Image (tube, rainbow, N blue to C red):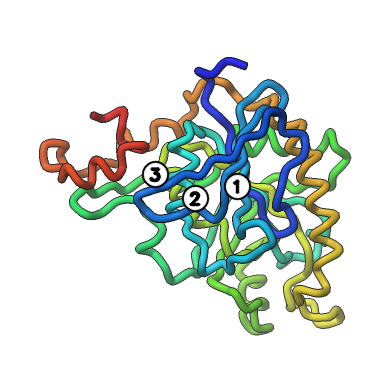
Amino acid sequence: MNQDIPAIGIIGGSGLYQMEGVEKPTEQRVETPFGDPSDIIIGGEMHGRQVYFLPRHGRGHRLLPHELNHRANIYALRSLNVRWIICVTAVGSLQEQYAPRDVLLPSQFFDRTSRRSEHTFFGSGIAAHVGFADPISTNLRHILAESARESGVRVHNGGTYVNMDGPAFSTRAESELNRRHGFDVIGMTNLAEAKLAREAEIALATLAMITDYDCWKVEEEPVSAQTIFEHLVANAETAKTILAKAIPRVATEPNWPEHKALDSALVTERKLWPEATRTRLSAILGRFS
């Protein structure tokens, strides 16, 4: 394996707390300026590529959505030279055509969260405004779509993920409003990961694994942790199958649009950057030094 080739990160969601098939596994305890990641990061080789796996909620699912330190998670992966991230996340369906155990590959987000200050690395003397009109890496999303189709999975390439705070599920009124707005799936975690990955110049795409119909479908039982468990287990196995096909297809050169996201984003003149802030963001701003 060529050590000069940047790595691929995998963020595992509900039901996906470990990855089989990783050769020469190592445990990476990464300290970041933003605190600790969700768990130890497992590094290793898959299909000739360096990969790093991070369970979003910690092994054993110990962290609620509002407890996740997204900045530490993304910064830790970037410090390990990760330039592509595939997120796996459990979501509820807001439309009839997206059934449990289907896979949707979001192309857009709608933000209903309330923690904006924790969705950026910048501030403290360095201002940046990244372009986010297309929040998902199109190249990586199409790789996932092709890999899912080859795996025989019912996949929907494109759609809008609405991000709520949680940890409680939606009320019926909220679910029906999101549905009428034309949103496709709902979750509690992925938007912050996408924003921070863009600031870290990482290409990111998401496997949104559908577990339920939220609670808008009144003829069915409202979503609960108990009712989605079997779907979580099945979806985790599906995700592993897709990932095994997708990883060898990912580019080896970080030359996609996302990898230069800061070229037009940094507002503060470099001569004005506070040294402490520049040092804190060294994993992201290194190429500007």
The residue drawn where x is 66% and y is 56% is 59
- Secondary-structure class at tag 1: strand
The reply, left or right, for residue 200 in relation to residue 248 is left
Please say whether residue 138 is visible from this viewpoint.
no
Q: Is residue 93 left or right of residue 163?
A: right
Nearer mark to the viewer, of 2 and 3: 2
Badges 2 and 1: C-beta atoms under 8 Å apart? yes
Three-letter residue code for mark 1: Leu
Q: Position of residue 3 (x, y in %)?
A: 54, 19
Residue 288 position in % (x across, y down): 26, 30
Residue depth check, mark 1 versus mark 3: number of the one nearer the observer: 1
In the figure, 264 relative to 215: above or below? above
Q: Residues within 10 Å of mark 2 (few under 14, many from 20)?
A: many
Of the image marks 1 and 3, the number of the one nearer the N terminus: 1
Residue that lies at the very extreme toward the top in this rendered image: 2
Q: Return the residue at label 3.
A: 199
**How far separated are the C-alphas under marks 2 and 3?**
13 Å
Q: Earlier in the sequence, mark 2 or mark 3?
A: 2
Q: Mark 2 vs mark 1: which is more N-terminal?
A: 1
SS at mark 2 in the image: helix
Q: Which residue is mark 1?
A: 54
Residue at point 82%, 48% (across, down)? 237
Q: Is residue 111 above or below residue 6?
A: below
- Residue receiving disc 2: 73
**Which residue sits at x=78%, y=51%?**
236
- Give coordinates of residue 87: x percent, y percent: 62, 47
What is the three-letter code of the residue carrying label 3?
Glu
Q: Measure how far apart labels 1 and 3 are at the Cα level.
A: 19 Å
